[in-house]
Image (cartoon, grey):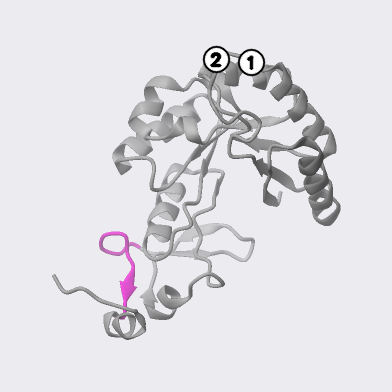
Amino acid sequence: MGRLKCKLYGDVGTDVAVIEAARNVVGDETYIVGDVNGGYRRKQSEDSVAAIAAALVDLHAAGLTACEDPAYMTPSQWAEVQRLVGGLDLLPDVPVRPAWKAARQINPNMGRVFNMHPACMGSAIEVVTLGRMIQGWGKRLMVGDSSLVGPACPAWQQIAIGLGADWVEAVEKPQENDVYQRCRTAAPTDRTPDGLFAYEAERPGFGTDLDADALRELSLATVTL
């Protein structure tokens, strides 16, 4: 199954139009995630979540498969919205940061997919502990994206591979910055023909080798410590 992520805006009419356009392009079999960044309620409150759930039902009817951070909610409100929206998968992201705090606060009723967001999680050991806890609930696991460049991407790809995560968004984006890719001489992970990430071979540390001279030449500035 293919996966597509769309940015949504917290306005039902606009978001329905985005989802319908995406669904028309990718077809019925693609898993479409809409990331609202809390757009349907910007601040956490004890107010009713009925309006949030009603908006998400409309998005699901338009073709949305999962919704990431639809609103700022308490754990119990997340669970209530997931109950109300039926077949739409909720995907908590902000509530899963950092790992040590999430392990004490989140619960399995908050969604069906949980996003571990690079650069926000704390230690790798706690990330693995949290990932195993989420999988123990029978939930799917996603390693997200922090617009990373450089060795951070294969590092998080290895964490995703080791955990057996359902998908990983921490990918290099040559169209945004290709300097790192031009200077990398070896990497521990690679994309398979079907788009999955594979761990190629054991290497020291996180396994990335760089041409330091080339990187220095292409950099705007360098610092020697």
Q: Is residue 156 left or right of residue 73?
A: left
Q: Quadrant of residue 96?
A: top left
Our reading of the magenta stretch's main secondary structure is loop
In the image, 62 versus 156, the foreground residue is: 62
The answer to whether any part of residue 29 appears in the image is: no
Residue drawn at x 16%, y 74% is 224
Query: Label 1, label 2: how many angstroms apart (C-alpha)?
Result: 6 Å
Residue assigned mark 1:
80
Amino acid type, mark 2: Ser
Find residue 9 and report its horizontal and vertical position in percent. 68, 42
Find residue 156 and report its horizontal and vertical position in percent. 41, 52
Residue drawn at x 66%, y 36% is 67
Q: Residues within 10 Å of mark 2 (few under 14, many from 20)?
A: few
Vertical side of 20 occupied by 11: above or below: above
Q: The C terminus lies in which quarter of the figure?
A: bottom left
Vertical side of 138 occupied by 185: above or below: below
Residue numbers of the magenta segment: 202-211
Amino acid type, mark 1: Glu
The answer to whether any part of residue 10 appears in the image is: yes
Q: Are marks 1 and 2 in contact (CB under 8 Å)?
A: yes
Q: Indicate which disc residue 76 carries.
A: 2
